[in-house]
Amino acid sequence: MKEYKVIGQSVRRLDAVEKATGTAGFTSDMKLPGMLYGKVLRSPHPHARIVGIDTSEAEKLPGVKAVATYKNTPRELFNTSATMTFTVPPMLPVLDQYIFDNVVRYVGDEVAAVAATSEKIAEAALGLIKVEYELLPAVYDPKEALTPGAPVIHESEKKNIPGEIIQIPYGDVDKGFTESDIIIEKEFKLPVQKQAQMETQAAVAQVGLDGKITVWSTTQTPHPTKMILSKVFSIPESKIRVLNPPYIGGGFGVRIGCSAKAEPIAVALSMLAKKPVKVVYSRKEDFIASDTRHGGYVSVKLGAKKDGAFHAMYLKATLNGGAYCSFSVETPGVLGCMGLAVYRVPNQLYYGHSVYTNTTPAGAMRGFGNPQAMYAIESVVDMMAEKLGMDPLKLRLKNIMQVGDPWVLPYRCGSTGLAECIEKGAKSIGWENRGKLNKPGARKLRGIGMGVGTHVSNAWPFCGDYDNAYITVQQDGSVHLASGVPDMGTGTSTSLPQLVAEVVGVGLDQVSMTFADTASTPFDIGSHASRTLYAAGTAVVEAARDVRKQVLEYAADLFKVAPERLVLQDGVISAASQDAGAVGDNCSGAPVCKIGGVEKKSITLKELAYDAHLRNKQFIGVGRIVPDNAPPWHAHFAEVEVDTELCQVRVLKVAAVHDVGKAIHPVICEGQIEGGVLQGIGYALSEEIKYDEKGRQLENSFHKYMLLTADDVPEIEAMLVESNDPTGPFGAKGVGECGLVPTAPAIVNAIYDATGIRFYEIPVTEEKIFKALKEHVK
Amino acid sequence: MNLKILKFTLNGEPIEITVSPDDMLVDVLRDKLELTGTKKGCGKGECGACTVIINGEAVNSCLVPAMKTMGANVETIEGIGSPEKFHPVQEAFMDLGAIQCGFCTPGMIMSAKALLDKTTSPTSKEIKRSLSGNICRCTGYVKIEEAVQAAAEKMREKQ
């Protein structure tokens, strides 16, 4: 195996010093000369027409510099999601949002915004805006919204369905079920989960008098966000700069595109006030007026032969898309693709779509449809195992996808370490103890369960996906990388420089990176779809190879040998030692390089770069790639304890094993998995936003929304498997989203193992356990 | 509202500043003193991102009226270490992967420091308890707890 110098090492993150000392820049920390503070007036009604709006009193309040409504802002339809505004044919873009509209469609929808000299004044001014609403009927459940009498939320081709219905046929599903010996069909209900990233949505906009716009924001995708703003405000993209300053307090999908509407609102206010404007969402605004995960319904019909071979599967999803489309077309698409890609099933069909309702828009959240699919599928796989009388682990091993297997995805299954993941996880959890953990009559019942799955390593073919990077060797031989991706905490500003250092042949201390800035980096689609290291990393590797080639070609002239004979390692260029050794004269015959009138056997990149500078030359490497795609794989095993008196579930341990292809920075990989596990435990047991009969979000703060704290963390054993995918940089695949995906099914299967009760709805709260136990005793 | 003069010790330096009685400490630190290392994640004492140490206790600075700190000794992330000499907690957070997005990090480090100022031999339970008011959505807390353990060990060695 090749020895690597920099990759595979868990070096101190390059952003660590700034983040540990409090000097790291975040949007919410920014202050510009003359900056105003923006606040947003939000709808108290789930569905209403604005028949009158009077802002005159607000405008008179001292300190108020601008009030924006639908009357004085652009009437240009757009979509806050990065992909949908510029979707790739044949998919049609669904553009259903204005910055402000005269119809509000959920509690929290934007009505107006104020810019003032302080946050307090802006807040006070909101109270002076008089709005007259004509109330419209509202609907909150996606199934209800499809019924004939339901209110229409947007005019669309099919009533209340944003965009197209996704259908993925594979084989002959009807014939498949006819030929199956056992069929199980179940429907599952899924909660609305919230990303709850630590930094709320935020933007600072500065509109120059020359018409140029600079926006510092929390977006995960600066370049696509620039495109959206260009469309909304009809300003050339070349005059808009979007950047992170340079960090973001988490993402988890909540700002793929705009940061809710923070960017367009800040720009609109800045245009009106002719001053910089800062808009920072309160935590409540972040909860109620910023994309959530899609809740809704997923049903699975699985057919198997007597020997356990899966033979047919019908997967159906009806997701709650909320009031605006956002990612409501792509999410059911990914749900179907991931659900159908885990097992070899010769006959499959997926049918899925989202539904408009009068709730907070649902968009992207870590896993992007995949957690919804796999909670349902992995529950049914366990049920199938029981019916077949088989060990659920063995049933999975029998049916999981193998390298080169035909599948529904339009790219190859080029690697899988899933079997190894299952083996390692089973060992860690003590799978052999399953079913032997409880004494008869015990109050606290223990159980073990598992869940597996796959994911993507970028967004192709679900949306356009390409990457660029350039690398310049500075005049002192140090190396600079420019990439348009952000670092939202996932460590890209460390792992991408690691790739550069490895490929170019310099120490990591010689590499620095500019990121998340449309003015100083080439286009990149941004951080989502577990893609950054895999896809942007591929462009970075290409740019690094390019710059290394240029360096060696330049050096070859000085050494008077072919460039192939030169090596660049640890920042030093010399002729390959094996060549020197071949002449057998202890290197005395090795080529020498004449630089500055002196002959040397080796020269440093520093010397070479300066020599090039004196001859009017800089080395600039460019990487322009369209990524392939690759499946990461994962198996999670959970052990739980159910207290049958308190009706509480305690997760005792999660063993999380992930095939990451190749770990470029193992500790960052583990951190991604551990964080994902915790969000998955929340998804399974506590996290949910529910609505009251007036469309108000019942969970609109950290206090009400039950996030896990340090006190709730079980033992988590994160383990890595390296299958070396042929398409990824050094074999790497995506890792960011996977930790969440198989956690909920592993826990729900463990609860079943402990209690004999299967939950078809998550989160499995105390209330649900109480009801189920009561039923069970009957 | 009548403005008041507030005097307190901030990171070892005497501070005198004019504040409004309804100003919260977090806003005075961030907006008036431009110490933005202290983060604001909710403004309601529910996330711990704004944790500072007042007279040895870790507190949410968004819940503390600034005037309440009259004469107090206040420590923020800016005062506990720098590249010349990091605090052992900062060092451990950096080296053990306890930092991801970094938004909870200052508050988390301050909570950990307040604990370790009281005891350098905390149990796992004590660490979890003292960090349970600080929400981190990235790490799953695993490496954070490991880092606090490691920092405690380092501080014990120095004693």
Image: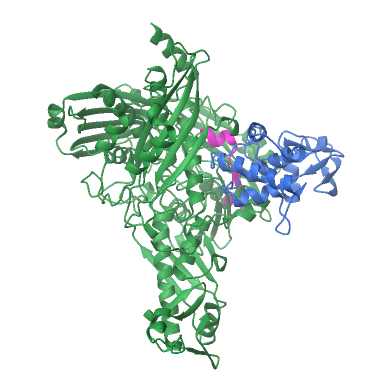
Chain colours: A green, B blue
Percent x, y for residue A675? 51, 40
Instruction: State the count of labels.
Output: 0
Residue displayed at 35% across by 43% down: A420
Residue under the image location 43 percent in, 61 percent down: A523
The answer to whether residue A568 is above or below residue A435 is below
Is A289 inside the magenta-drawn segment? yes
Is A110 left, or right, of A349 in this rendering? right
Please indicate, yes or no, whether residue B138 appears anywhere in the rendered image. yes
Q: Residue furthest top?
A: A778
Residue A76 lies, in percent from the top left, at 42, 47
**Residue visible at 67% across and 44% down in the picture:** B109
Is residue A586 depicted above or below A177 in this figure?
A: below
In this orientation, which residue lies closer to the viewer: A450 or A461?
Answer: A450
The residues colored magenta run A270-290
- Asked if A427 appears above or below B94 in the picture, the reply is above
Could you tell me if residue A273 is visible in this image?
no
Left or right: A495 with respect to A349? Answer: right
Q: Quadrant of the N terminus of chain A?
A: bottom left
* x and y, in percent, of residue A602 in the image: 50, 83
Asked if residue B89 is among those painted magenta in the image, a careful observer would answer: no
Q: Among all residues in the image, which is located at the extreme bottom?
A: A597
Q: Nearer the viewer, residue A773 or A307?
A: A307
With respect to residue A708, does A327 lie above or below? below
Q: x, y percentage for residue A638?
A: 43, 31
Instruction: State the quadrant of the C terminus of chain A.
Output: top left
